[in-house]
Every structure is written in C-alpha cells, then in structure tokens.
Amino acid sequence: EHSILQAGYCALRALNIGQTLPTLTPVVARSYASLLQITASSGGSARQVQFYKDKALETCHELGEYALLAYTLLAVGANNAGNARWTEAETNLSEAVKLVGQLKDKRQWEDCLSHQAHLEFYHGNFATSRELYERAMHSAKERNDKQIQNRCNSGIAGVLLVTNELNEAIDILKHTNSWGQYALCLLRL
C-alpha cells in the first residue's frame, strides 16, 4: 500500500511538472497512464478510472504514444477481470489488441490475446478461449518465446481439463510448469 501511495505521488508530481511545460510532452501521457493503473489497481472509483483512462487515451493519441497506451489498457483490463468488471475488461483488452496489432508488437499482442483467452475461459466460452490461446501460441512459436508458449499451453490444458479431455491435457501438461494442473489431471485419470 505504501508503494502505491508513493507511485501515485510521483505520477501526480510528474503530471504537474509536465503540465507547466509550453508543449504537451510524453511525461504527461505517461503520468496519466500511471495514474490510470494506480487508480484501477487500488480500487479507485469507476469515475476516477474513466477520467484517467480518457486523459491517457487523449494524450497518448495526441502524442502518438500508442505502445504505452496499449500496455496501460492491458494492465487495466487484467485488473478489471480480477475485480469481475467483465465488460470493462473486454473493452480494455480489445482496445489493447487493436493497438498492438497496429504497432506489430507480437509479444504484447500475444500477451493481450492470452488475457482475453483467460477472460473467455471464466465466461465459460471454452472453444473461444482455446482458439485465442492457440493463436497466441502460434505467434509465440514463430518467435521461440517459451514463456508465452508455456502460458498458452497451461491455458489450453485448463480448457481440456474442464471439458474432461484428460489424456490430451496430460500430454500438454508434461511439458509445462503447471504442476497443480498436472497433479489434478493425474488424480482425475
């Protein structure tokens, strides 16, 4: 909690300094993005979160700071999902996917897709969840990104577990670090 207060102070201070400059600078965009993340993660009101989101969007668009905006939307979307704000999570994650798609940032695109897949899983949309994980995994394999591949394999295995496709799940889980899922799968066989 103390770190959140310090981060909030630093972001506000940077914003105040940035706003005194004669032209709009990336400092202002980063400050609004930071305040958005801090407010969303610390349980700020929906009104505050929306205010900082709007300001971050506005300044990031004006300055062309789209990578920062996409990262912020991803972080806020994941936070929304963690707080069962499903519609907001879907909106923020979808916006992030569009932005990183335009930027051609494959790593962040895969990250966004895997978060969307996780969200679909908890909505009970298992086929959609699996399809999103597989899209992210395909991209990660092209880049040889083991971390994203592991995350996607774990997500796919979760879908297989819930749909009772245990043999296929165990084949995947043998090659991940998802020991809890692997143990659950072994218990269910």
Image (cartoon, grey):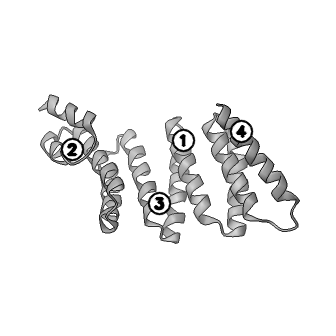
Precedes in sequence: disc 3 or disc 4: 4
Amino acid on which disc 2 is placed: Leu
Left or right of 62, for residue 109:
left
Amino acid on which disc 1 is placed: Asn
Residue 86 image point, x, y percent: 51, 41
Q: Secondary structure at mark 3?
A: helix
- Residue drawn at the location 73% of the way across and 48% of the way down: 11
Label 3 and label 1: CA atoms lie apart by: 16 Å
Q: Which residue is disc 3 drawn over?
A: 108
Between label 2 and label 1, give the one nearer the viewer. Answer: 2
Q: Secondary structure at mark 1?
A: helix
Q: In the picture shown, does residue 144 fall above or below 46? A: below
**Where the N terminus falls, by quadrant?**
top right
- Residue drawn at the location 67% of the way across and 47% of the way down: 36
* The label number, if any, that marks residue 173 in the structure image: 2
Label 2 Cα crowd, 10 Å radius (few <14 / some 14-19 / many 20+) = many
Q: Which residue is disc 1 drawn over?
A: 79
Precedes in sequence: disc 3 or disc 1: 1
Between label 4 and label 1, give the one nearer the viewer. Answer: 4
Front residue of 168 and 46: 168
Between label 3 and label 1, give the one nearer the viewer. Answer: 3
